[in-house]
Image (cartoon, rainbow, N blue to C red):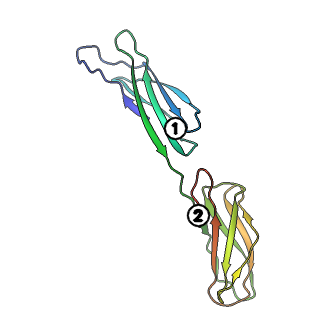
Amino acid sequence: VSGKLANTTGSEPQISAGLPVEVAFTSPAGKTPTYQVETQIGGIYQLLPVFTPDEVGNWQLKVSFLGNDDFKPSEFSASIVVAKGLSTIKFTDSDSPKSGQQVSMVGTMEPKLADQTLLLKIIKPDGSVQATPELKTDSDGSFKHQLSFDQSGNWELVAIWAGNSNYQSAE
């Protein structure tokens, strides 16, 4: 969040550095983290580090200047809609296995979330679908599954994550 306090009359003194500005975010659940920043020369202010919302939904932003001897109090409010983040799943490239060979299929999920349940759908060259137990992601979002290639031809592997309250599902 960054902005600038403005002197709307033009005849009053310039806005100096060091004036306190309060920046507050109200989450959809009602939590309100509040930050104090100060103006720079010319009334510019900036919240650093950047605020990252941790909830999906409608957030309320409120920026307040309490005023001083030279300037009246002012306030700015805005609504910010935070949508679910995107997620992806991909398999790391592996050499083409031979029929009868067992290979460890390794993949990664973004975001890198630990202990997430993935379903693995394996479609064999003859069109049959192989059932697999649920897979769990490691702390770095990776997962693996030992797979025996008992048929020659093209195999299709699809990892599916249902998503959660902050991220969309992925396939």
Residue at x 68% of width, y 84% of height: 97
Circle 2 residues within 10 Å: few <14, some 14–19, many ≥20? some
Q: Quadrant of residue 135?
A: bottom right
Q: In which quarter of the image is residue 123?
A: bottom right
User: Where 64 sits versus 122, above or below?
Assistant: above
Give the mark nearer the N terminus: 2 vs 1.
1
Task: Look at the numbered disc 1 and give the secondary structure of its residue.
Answer: loop
What is the CA distance from the residue labelled 2 to the residue labelled 1?
Answer: 26 Å
Residue at x 63% of width, y 73% of height: 158
User: Where 88 sits versus 60, above or below?
Assistant: below
User: Where 159 sits versus 60, above or below?
Assistant: below
User: Where 47 sits versus 143, above or below?
Assistant: above
Residue for badge 2: 170
| Residue type, mark 1 in image | Phe
> Of 84 and 111, which appears nearest the observer?
84
**Residue positioned most to the top:** 69
74 on left or right of 34: left
Q: What x and y, as percent, mark residue 77?
A: 42, 31
